[in-house]
Image (cartoon, helix red, strand yellow):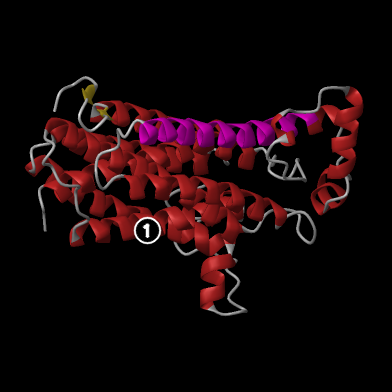
């Protein structure tokens, strides 16, 4: 296939080079990565409940005058986070503007990502530039992006009436959906990159080994999201022991072990801390397979991502949840997902077992 646009006068079809699609998808992936980082900042600054309404169009602009700011602040004053926490603490309008800013940026970026995906997709579609078999996948990614906006509001709404924060279950769904979209963008871009080199190339497959690695990483990411949602990172600032104990004291099993596993901050922190090493073993095995398949760069990316992530996780705990380190920890977690998508794609193209 030529590396430039080709116009077939008989069929009237314009075929864009697949590497244009690759560049587009990778740009969107970068935007999703930034979204994950901003989401981490929003969570860590307790900004997520500052905007109490969902206005997809009108909400694009922030308050533009003092009266509008006061109106938004008055709406915020009606929810439990303010009446039980920030109100008694004496929150000022200036402090409200700070948390509003991060939630507004988070939502604005979501809109930007939607447009950055939908408009080029429509253009490529109209130009008949999407290779056969890729339209359903691209539509699925578009649908997931739209669903993610709905999930975001579903998450926020859980903290507007009976709670002082959002449901950690819904937060986990929101974060994991974002990471799934990121992985899907990277995987699809890699398929199209292979197609650009050889139009007969078939999409990579998810092998049994890849599925196991992904499942192990999913568990780690799930508990990481629960740790964030339950503020479980604050229960211990020591490592490797938690408050001088391997298994931390204070775990509430009064409602059963399973309930504690998914709700107790001590236990979720403990699992996230030690399941990480199972994930490391799985990722090392994945990296070895990618290297054996001849793609050393993917192996290096996997090792680098999880290595930095482990160090950041330990440092975040030992500094009492330093916000810079905590945001970096979430950011590199997204890079672990991207590197894992790359590695599993490599062995999927080589039909590794």
Q: Which of the two residues, 86 or 199, is positioned nearer the viewer here?
A: 199
Examine the rendered structure and indicate whether residue 170 appears above or below residue 47: below
The magenta stretch is: 97-126
| Residue at image point 24% right, 26% down | 17
Which quarter shows the N terminus?
A: top left
Quadrant of the rendered image containing residue 138: top left
Q: Is residue 200 magenta?
A: no
Q: Is residue 325 visible?
A: no
Q: Camera-side residue: 47 or 123?
A: 123
Q: Residue at x 56, y 71 (%)?
A: 260
54 or 212: nearer the viewer:
54
> In the displayed structure, would residue 129 be above or below residue 224?
above
> Seen in the image, is 331 located left or right of residue 90?
left
Other-residue count near label 1 (Cα within 10 Å), few / some / many at <14 / 14–19 / ≥20: some
Q: State the count of labels.
A: 1
In the figure, 270 relative to 297: above or below?
Answer: below
Residue shown at the point (86%, 29%) measured from the top left = 69
How far across and down, in percent of the image, does residue 196 sit?
Answer: 18, 31
**Residue 348 in view of the camera:** yes
| Quarter of image, res 308 | top left
Q: Residue 80 location in percent, x, y? A: 82, 53
Kindly identify which residue carries mark 1: 275
Secondary structure state at the residue bearing disc 1? helix
Q: x, y percentage for residue 154?
A: 65, 55
**Magenta residues, dominant SS class:** helix
135 or 8: nearer the viewer: 8
Quadrant of the rendering where the C terminus is positioned: bottom left
> Magenta includes 112?
yes
**Left or right position of 78 against 159:** right
């Amino acid at each position: 296939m030529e590396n430039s646009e080709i116009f077939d006068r008989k069929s009237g079809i314009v075929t864009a080079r697949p590497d244009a699609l690759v560049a587009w998808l990778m740009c969107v992936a970068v935007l999703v990565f930034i979204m994950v980082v901003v989401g981490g900042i929003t969570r860590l600054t307790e900004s997520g409940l500052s905007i109490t309404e969902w206005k997809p169009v009108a909400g694009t602009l922030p308050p533009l005058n003092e009266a509008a700011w006061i109106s938004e602040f008055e709406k915020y004053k009606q929810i439990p986070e303010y009446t039980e926490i920030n109100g008694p603490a004496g929150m000022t309008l200036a402090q409200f503007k700070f948390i509003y800013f991060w939630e507004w940026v988070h939502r604005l970026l979501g809109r930007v990502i939607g447009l950055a995906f939908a408009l080029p997709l429509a253009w490529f579609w109209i130009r008949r530039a999407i290779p056969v078999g890729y339209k359903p996948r691209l539509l699925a990614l578009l649908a997931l992006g739209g669903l993610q906006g709905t999930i975001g509001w579903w998450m926020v709404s859980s903290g507007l009436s009976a709670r002082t924060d959002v449901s950690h279950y819904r937060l986990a769904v929101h974060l994991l959906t974002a990471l799934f979209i990121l992985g899907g963008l990277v995987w699809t871009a890699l398929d199209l990159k292979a197609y650009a080199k050889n139009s007969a190339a078939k999409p990579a497959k998810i092998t049994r080994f890849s599925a196991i690695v992904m499942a192990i990483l999913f568990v780690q990411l799930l508990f990481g999201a629960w740790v964030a949602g339950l503020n479980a990172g604050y229960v211990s600032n020591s490592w490797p022991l938690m408050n001088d104990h391997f298994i931390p004291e204070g775990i509430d099993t009064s409602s059963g072990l399973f309930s504690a596993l998914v709700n107790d901050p001590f236990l979720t922190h403990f699992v996230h801390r030690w399941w990480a090493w199972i994930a490391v073993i799985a990722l090392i095995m994945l990296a070895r397979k990618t290297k054996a398949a001849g793609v050393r760069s993917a192996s290096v990316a996997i090792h680098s991502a999880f290595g930095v992530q482990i160090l950041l996780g330990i440092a975040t705990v030992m500094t009492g949840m330093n916000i810079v380190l905590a945001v970096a920890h979430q950011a590199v977690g997204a890079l672990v997902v991207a590197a894992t998508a790359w590695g599993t794609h490599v062995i999927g193209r080589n039909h590794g077992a």
